[in-house]
Amino acid sequence: MRPFDYTRATAPQEAAAMAAAGATKFIAGGTNLLDLMKLQVETPEKLVDVTRLPMKDIVAEGDGLKIGALVPNSDLAADERVRRDYPVLSRALLAGASGQLRNKATTGGNLLQRTRCYYFYETSARCNKREPGSGCDAIGGFNRIHAILGTSDACIATHPSDMAVAMRALDAEIETLTPDGATKRHPIADFHRLPGDTPNVETVLSPGELITAVHLPAPLGGTQIYRKVRDRASYAFALVSIAAVVTMDAGKIGTVRLAFGGVAHKPWRNEAVEAALAGETPSAALFDKAADILLAEAKGFGENDFKIPLARRTLAAVLAEATGVSL
Amino acid sequence: MSEHTIQMDKPIGETRLDRRVQDVIGKGVARHEGPLKVSGRATYAYENLAGDGKNVAYGFIVTSTIGAGKIKRIDAVAALGKAGVLHVVTDSDGPRASADPGDKKPTAINGQITHYGQPVALVVAESFETARDAAKLVTVEYEPTEGTYALEDAQDKAFDPGQGVMPSIVKKGDFDKGFAAAEIKFDQTYTTTSQSHSAMEPHACVAEWNGDELTLYGCYQLVSTNVGQLAAALGIDKSHIRMVNPYIGGGFGGKLGIGPESVFAAKAAKVVGRPVKLALTRQQVYQDTSRRTDTIQRIRIGCDRNGVINAISHDTLCGNTPGDTVFEPAGISTVFLYDGENRLITHRLAEVNVVLASAMRAPGEAVGMLALENAMDELAEQLGIDPIELRKRNEPKVDPQDGKPFSSRMLVECMEEGAKRFGWADRSKVPGARREGEWLIGTGMAAASRKNLLQKASAKVELRPDGSATIETDMTDIGTGTYTILSQIAAEMLGLPLDKVAVTLGDSDLPQAPGSGGSWGANSSGSSVYAACEGIIEKIAAKLGVEPAGLTLKDGTVIADNKQTALTELLAGEPITVTGTFKPGDAFKGTHQASYGAHFCEVAVNAVTGETRVRRLMTVAAAGRILNEKTATSQSYGGQIFGIGATLTEELVVDPRTGLIVNHDLAEYHVPVNADVPQLEVVFLDERDHAASPLASKGIGELALSGVGAAISNAIHNATGIRLRDYPMTLDKVLAGWAAGKQAA
Amino acid sequence: MRLTINGVGQELDLDIRTSLLDALRDHLALTGTKKGCDHGQCGACTVLINGRRVNSCLTLAVMHEDDEITTIEGLGQPGNLHPMQESFLQHDGFQCGYCTPGQIVSAVGMLDEAKKGWPSHASKDLDGTVSLDNAEISERMSGNICRCSAYPNIVDAIRDVNEKGAA
């Protein structure tokens, strides 16, 4: 870990201003940042401790909820309103990490988690995300945990968050504060980026821009499922995960939201999949058609080829469960 | 002080341990050192000299960023320029990995890079934070060479490694002829991946010099061996080293040999004139210590239609770093587990640029029995014979290799008892027949055997004037329960309440024991305590003028000739001190000794995702006298869970392009977590093996791992109809099985 | 900086980079809290911060000047063991002992979470009722790796304490 300057911010605006220039990072839960700093994957020169900022509450806002950026994952998962109205979010959070990590990791930090790509974590390997232009050792290497959708020649890493996948299905919005005092709201759809030629740029955040809250729109109701497939029964990152929110209308699928984890550089959602399902009578054939749309552009890189059939099968099972159809 | 030696030349019959006058032997008493461990007061290696003002310096290892080549230059100028940096060790005689326990010393770097992430230097600084940071500033210039990183790529150049813990080739009769003539020919190849011991305590030490005398607070399994290795690596006489490691945070074979941490720390401490503390990072543990090799194993069995084996062969290919010639004795059980006239067990070794392959829990059996017991299940299915019945039909009466009698062998009893308890008769014989919702349910079984090993061991026991006793030996407790069982043996022998017995372990100043490895510890070291106690009893008898056999010792008193005397009175202020030594003898050589068992497993395989969950796992074991039911059960759980990991999740992945161990942390090297493990069942059959040791015990710590994975994989087959032969059986392989054959879901 | 550990205030002069774990182990001689991976992947370093279980390896000491930190040493000592420590001892919920302090502290924190009605991945419902059966305990304790594999006994030890309402 390189030496750094440490400053405590006392107000959000102050924090944003402190971080406007230089290699500065906000630190809150620290569960991913310190992990990466120890390996010198992250080498900030300045840390702005934001843990004392007043962003720790979950409050009702219209029909929805406003979640402070510092709300720990545990508290968010256990919140009565989240459990009742957004169970897919509770479930996603509970499927992630461990009890200890969820107690520390924050809502804002979770969105900014960096990939678990082995080569990103190993500073002696080539990685365009860690060191732009150096190459990608995951392509042609051991890429079991890597992406099958939205990849580029520069990067095939995945976003590791479970929480963000559920939030993507819920159409959350991310509220930020910029160093010049402006408040912004980013739809989660636009918040994370695909790797393209610049996999080092992972979100739309500009320097110093501080996540202050996440807004959840009005509850969607319906059946909400978060299914995570992984190599251990617990405490492992997703190979494939699916957040689903489905309503039924007289035996037909009403509305449907589907977001996918473990398959792309960002929480993945393809509205065409949902459109193909809405208004239809659920059946194995229909689910297969949905998977065809989802996976039309899917590309395996060898070790992760299995994710394509796995995503197909898991999608069918989730849809069957959500619609009450037995396959 | 006097000595008392027992050489095991013939079986020892009934002993005080059988009479159980004090009635503590075998009991599941809580761990002797338990209160210290549960309260965080047991001091592990790194934790020595904490907060005692000794001005400790901190070390951090620098590792290579290539997999094969030469070190041209190490530039430590930038690191040394950093405030707080005290020294950088760049000696080329530093170790490139841990030592194999059989080696005199760890293999030196000698200017070469033989594997990725290899130690090349050590930075010493005032603080851990500075040392870690400065380690990144040491630049190493390499001359890379073409490395070989995958076992498959190296197999053409594989060679016969010769004698290891067993001969590399064991044969009898004419396998080729027998196999050719067999009515039924079975021939399959199985693969297992590299595995990591992954003890929770990373390799760590504190090195402190006092003049030319080194005290090394370490975490090693074999104290006397490791002192010798450290001395040889440092080029000093071993009399100058005292090694202290009373508590070891898990070993599993990973701490059998001295590690690079201790050699580097000792070198650095000498230069900086201060104690040096050093723990490998978790990542370095994966890359700089040792691993279990990956294997490619071919099993061939020739038999008749009734399954009676006429020819059996087990060929193993494994890998090791150039210069390290230890091989994984995967065929070790195949030598004696099943009958058959014509036998051929071979091992070949290939050079790969991957960190040292050395012993990991149940070396040989752990992976060898995955193949053998998978094969037996396949053969049983092919023949339409129940897997237990097939094994019974091939139960040998004597060691099928050399005709020696078995000292004791309860394999059939273990299988029968297990079948009864598990409900084996009710299983579905047709694969894929049981389903609960999304889950396909299957059951499987496998046999277990683990060769019994014995070593010379010594321990000093002192019966003190206050009626208490102390046991002192350099034996280690790596979580196995050594403290506890030694105290139970002494308490039973000397008729003392358990709380009157104190145990000191892991200090090289104490009498030599063989350490913890190969499941020999309890039996060997325990027998030395037995011998010392026998010596003490003889002295007590002499004091009373009676034969030792006429003495009864109970609750701190001695009873002879109908007279009960308190030990405190009898000792009259004088302690009795005896160093007991146990030596294996003709009884060991004249019989074939092994522990046996049977595993039964029920798995659920998700028909959608291919995820496997172990729902039930039962091991029935016969390993002679159980010295402590609680710690023996825990050891067996440990073996079972090691097997769950090896079968379902654990795979140390080496990038075949560079040699980088890709998943070198606990997030991605998947040892089982609590949720992967159901409540397990362990049953010990009553057995005394009087030829094995005065304790009539045999090894237990590795038995439950031997074969257990095959019970799991056989259950996966029973659940799904898919026969996987490539461990670990991760969900992608199950999905591929479905894609190739019939579909689930 | 000032830290409050097990109810005792401590003044420390530390490198700002010092993790809470290293502050305990290297600077306060509180070595009961263990370093197994230093990256939040094993749970051996678990401590309670204001009663919540966290990985002390993944937080900076300087960030906890206002917090109450409880380590294994603060739970109980030989002769005066915490009920969870005693239960681990009786159920043989450990072998080598290295992950044990983290397991015990984690278990204490976990029971508190369950009491508050926090759900887990193993919970069938999210309705705020928690019944700590084996599957629930296993899931909630999966952030603490035990390579000796004392898991069955760890589960028994915790269930026992929970059922006796002792912690």
Image: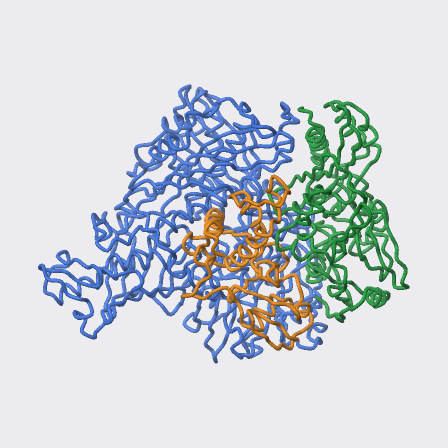
Residue drawn at (45%, 21%) of the image: B383
Evaluate whether residue B611 shows in this view. Answer: yes
The answer to which quarter of the image holds residue A104 is bottom right
- Residue B731 sits above or below residue A18 on the image: above
Q: Which chain is green?
A: A
Q: Is residue A104 left or right of residue A154?
A: left
Q: Nearer the viewer, residue B476 or A202?
A: A202
Q: Which chain is orange?
A: C
- Residue A80 sits above or below residue B427 on the image: below
Residue drawn at (78%, 69%) of the image: A10
**How far from the left and from the top, in percent, is residue C27?**
58, 73
Chain B drawn in what color? blue
**How far from the left and from the top, in percent, is residue C151?**
49, 48
Q: Is residue B577 left or right of residue B117?
A: left
**How far from the left and from the top, in percent, is residue B598?**
40, 36
- Residue B530 sits above or below residue B328 on the image: below
